[in-house]
Image (cartoon, rainbow, N blue to C red):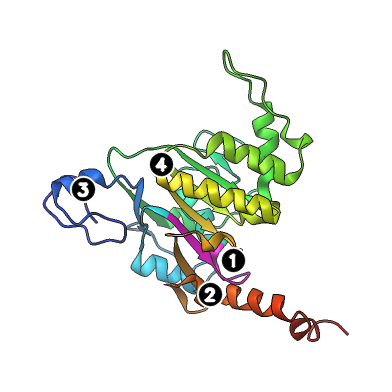
């Protein structure tokens, strides 16, 4: 672990500066690393700890660079489990929103967050936000019920917009300043054009000091220049290039010849 007082230690983690004092001061990543909380115990044979990416995170930890990091993998690979737990470990509501969000429908999240510790950069932005596609309805209801502050315009009636429009509205209001942002499959709400708009949001956010961790199935989102991609499977997670992703390969083949896939699923 790198501490603020160890100002002569060189930071070799991804996204870190390699100078001593001056470099450390310039590195304003809100979250430097996710690792196992010392003293915690768990049964490695139980879910979610038996998932290979979860086991790897607890064993090795995960350094988070500046900018955008994507987690990709099949359903059940553990990407949503990881982002949910990291968001909760950051103090965010596991059903979405900021650190101040207070809403809950049905508790379904794993206990993984209790085993995690986030190593933060002292003095970095503390603002953070979590968006997850499967709990957006509850978040919209919570946001609509919040009273407008003095001099503020009445809040948008999110439930009166389409799913994609409301999602973009939340992005526009909350995703624009330095901080730590976690997203879980945001493309589920968005059209092709709206996904392009989200790419622009992420690009601008990273350029403005935002740090993003996003689980996704989208080859469009993961093509964001400069993003780090981790591919999850039954062996754990590892860095990957966009053109080498399994999801990119499948979409490329499907769009070239749909019948090569459909003949295996249609009678």
* Label whose residue precedes the other's in the sequence (2 or 1): 1
Q: Nearer the viewer, mark 2 or mark 3?
A: 2
Quadrant of the drawing holding the C terminus: bottom right
Give the mark nearer the N terminus: 4 vs 2: 4
Q: What is the spatial separation of the Cα atoms under label 4 and label 2, in whole angstroms?
A: 28 Å
Which label belongs to residue 219? 1
Of the two numbered discs 4 and 3 on the same chain, state the one appearing first in sequence: 3
Quick one: quadrant of the N terminus? bottom left
Along the line of sight, the residue nearer the viewer: 213 or 134: 213
Q: Circle 2 is placed at which residue position?
A: 245
What segment is highlighted magenta in the picture? 68-79
**Residue 208 image label:** 4
Residues at badges 2 and 1 in contact (C-beta under 8 Å)?
A: yes
Secondary structure beneath label 4: loop
The residue at which mark 3 appears reads as 24
- Residue 39: image quadrant is bottom left
| Residue 250 coordinates in the image, percent (x, y) | 64, 77
Q: Where, by quadrant of the figure, is residue 239 drawn?
A: bottom left
Mark 1 surroundings within 10 Å by alpha-carbon count, few (fewer than 14), some (14 through 19), many (20 or more): some
Q: Nearer the viewer, mark 4 or mark 3?
A: 4
Q: Secondary structure at mark 3?
A: helix
Residue 194 located left or right of residue 211: right
Residue at image position (58%, 41%) is 171
Residue pictured at 74% horizontal, 82% vertical? 261
């Amino acid at each position: 672990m790198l501490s603020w007082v160890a100002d002569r230690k060189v930071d070799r983690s991804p996204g870190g500066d390699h100078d001593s004092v001056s470099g450390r001061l310039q590195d304003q990543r809100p979250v430097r690393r996710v690792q196992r909380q010392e003293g915690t115990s768990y049964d490695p044979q139980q879910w979610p700890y038996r998932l290979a990416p979860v086991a790897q995170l607890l064993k090795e930890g995960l350094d988070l660079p500046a900018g955008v990091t994507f987690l990709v993998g099949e359903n059940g690979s553990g990407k949503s489990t990881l982002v949910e737990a990291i968001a909760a470990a950051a103090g965010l509501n596991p059903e979405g929103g900021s650190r101040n969000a207070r809403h809950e429908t049905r508790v379904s999240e794993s206990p993984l967050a209790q085993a995690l510790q986030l190593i933060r950069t002292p003095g970095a932005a503390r603002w953070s936000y979590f968006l997850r596609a499967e709990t957006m309805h509850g978040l919209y209801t919570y946001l609509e019920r919040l009273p407008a502050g003095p001099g503020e315009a009445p809040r948008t009636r999110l439930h009166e917009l389409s799913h994609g429009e409301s999602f973009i509205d939340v992005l526009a209001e909350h995703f624009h300043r330095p901080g730590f942002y976690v997203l879980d499959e945001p493309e589920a709400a968005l059209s092709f054009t709206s996904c392009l708009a989200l790419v622009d949001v992420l690009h601008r956010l990273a350029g403005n000091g935002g740090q993003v961790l996003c689980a996704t199935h989208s080859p469009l989102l993961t093509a964001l220049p400069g993003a780090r991609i981790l591919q999850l499977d039954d062996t754990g997670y590892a860095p990957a290039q966009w053109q080498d992703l399994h999801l990119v390969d499948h979409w490329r083949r499907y769009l070239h010849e749909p019948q090569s896939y459909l003949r295996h699923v249609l009678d």
